Image: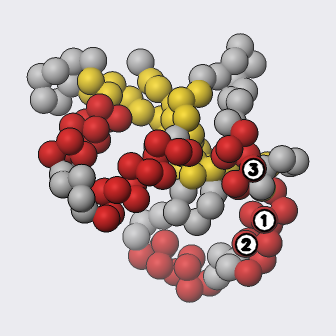
Amino acid sequence: MEERVLSEGPDGRVVERTIRRYSQDGRPGQTERIRIEERLAKASSLNPSVMRFKNSVNYYGQCASMDGQGRVLIHPLLREKAGTQGEVAVLGQQEFLEVWNRAAFEERLERDPLTDEDLAILAESGI
């Protein structure tokens, strides 16, 4: 079973993460989210990075489910923060989806295009 969680990424984009159940540690049914929560419980709650992470996840992190047509309703807080009121671009990033304001993403592509140097690096990596 999978759980989908929407949250704001560090640069303001809305990110949907797919959390898969695992059983590597002999506890079938645990989710990655629960593993993260267990690690956070062991971390100092006074650590500023831990506090910022918890604040961000608790404020913007919302559980969501897909409807019968495969659509995900993005929480209004996330839509407003990410500026995804109109057309969006949905990008598959291996283990999660990124949802961008379409115009903002197209501007980013123009500002930071895929270059011949990028292609050479990818080729060296076998991609």
| Residue with the most extreme bottom position | 117
- Residue 100 appears in the rendering: no
Where in the figure is residue 81, as x and y percent of width and height? Answer: 70, 54
Q: Which residue appears at 24% of the width and 46% of the height?
A: 40
Corner quadrant of residue 51:
bottom left
Q: Which mark is on residue 108?
A: 2
Residue 24 left/right relative to 69: left
Inspect the image, locate mark 1, and give the three-letter code of the amino acid beneath it: Ala
Who is closer to the viewer here, 114 or 125? 114
Inspect the image, locate mark 3, and give the three-letter code of the amino acid beneath it: Glu
Residue 31 left/right relative to 55: left
Inspect the image, locate mark 2, and give the three-letter code of the amino acid beneath it: Arg
**Viewer-nearest of discs 3 and 1:** 3
Distance CA(mark 2)–CA(mark 1):
6 Å
Where in the figure is residue 75, as x and y percent of width and height? Answer: 67, 36
Q: Which mark is on residue 104?
A: 1
Element type where label 2 sits in the image:
helix
Instruction: Residue under label 3, please give it.
Output: 80
